[in-house]
Amino acid sequence: MKLILFEDAVAFCDRTQSHLLHHPAEHNLLLGIQSALLRGSGAFPTPPDLLVVESAGEIQAVGTRTPPYNFVLSKVQNLGALDLIADYFYHASTSLSGINSFVREAQAFAHVWQTVTGQSSTLKMHLRIHQLTQVHSQADVQGHFRIATKRDRKQLLQWSEAFSLETFGDLEADIERILDLQIKRQDLYVWCDRKIVSMVAGRLSQPGGGRIGPVYTPPECRQRGYATACVSAVSQMLLDRGAQRCCLFTDITNPTSNHIYQTIGYKPVCDWHDYRFA
């Protein structure tokens, strides 16, 4: 086996996209990152790590790291590929903060990483990937959805920070930059009922697919169906624009959100682990 590093995003996508599309829902995050790389325009301020492990010309693993975020790993054919990946990051000039991948792959890489570096790992989040191919029902909720604008920025920044704290326990890096990029690219939507009451990010992010998330409703506006209505509307919009599927991640410890998305038409595909390294 050999590890191949790519400096050119187009070459990386050309080599890996068809492989990832064998499991498009499972690989929706990697495909979404590829889409952002190809769109350019400041999606990632730091040059990403783009790598492939091959054996006899066959792809064994695909991985991407966009600092300061965790390494994202595809399905792995031969777990021996993880030794090559761990060795690369061990000798890289920047540290590796964690691994996001399928349960099997994430657990295996965390073990290899501890063997190589001595760093222990903590399961930060247990997530589940869902896929929708048809919206089952539009929620009968007062109000409407629209594209977020710069006039909404102050409120949406507060919500983005609240989402990060509530979901991850701390403020994610680059919240303001990401929010401004979402508004600029018209990837962020709000539900309005006299005022904005919920926000949903949604975008076409891969050949034949769309991605939903993050989704946030402030506590005082919850349990009124706003998020359900907004996710439903944005999902239908992406399908109308040509997506064959929409994908999103849920925290399996949150039964409310899991139930809401399933009523819209999202079905569980697989589980996903987010490990952070000490």
Image: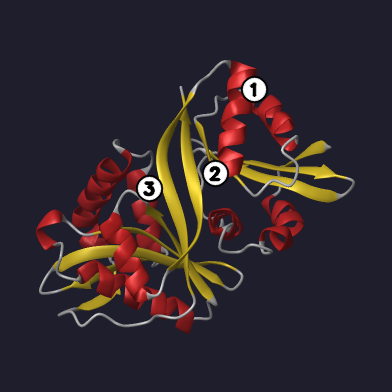
Q: Earlier in the sequence, mark 1 or mark 2?
A: 1
Where does residue 171 sit, x and y in percent of width and height? 30, 38
- Residue that badge 3 annotates: 177
Look at the image and tell me in which quarter the N terminus lies. top right
Query: Disc 3 or disc 2, which is closer to the eye?
Result: 2
Distance, label 1 to label 2, CA atoms, is 22 Å
Where does residue 95 sit, x and y in percent of width and height? 55, 24
Q: Is residue 139 left or right of residue 101?
A: left
Category of crowding for the residue at label 2, using alpha-carbon neighbours closer than 10 angstroms: few (below 14), some (14–19), many (at least 20):
some
Distance, label 1 to label 3, CA atoms, is 29 Å
Q: Quadrant of residue 169?
A: top left
| Point 59% across, 27% down: residue | 111
- Residue that badge 1 annotates: 90
Q: Is residue 99 above or below residue 92?
A: below
Query: Disc 1 or disc 2, which is closer to the eye?
Result: 2
- Element marked by disc 1: helix
| Point 45% across, 81% down: residue | 134
- Element marked by disc 2: helix
Category of crowding for the residue at label 3, using alpha-carbon neighbours closer than 10 angstroms: few (below 14), some (14–19), many (at least 20):
few
Q: Earlier in the sequence, mark 3 or mark 2?
A: 2
Amino acid marked by disc 3: Arg
- Residue that badge 2 annotates: 103
Where does residue 143 sit, x and y in percent of width and height? 17, 79
Q: Earlier in the sequence, mark 1 or mark 3?
A: 1
Q: Is residue 128 left or right of residue 194?
A: right
Q: Which mark is residue 53?
A: none
Where does residue 255 sit, x and y in percent of width and height? 29, 56
Query: Disc 1 or disc 3, which is closer to the eye?
Result: 1
- Element marked by disc 3: helix
Q: Residue furthest top?
A: 118
Distance, label 3 to label 2, CA atoms, is 30 Å
Q: Quadrant of residue 53?
A: top right
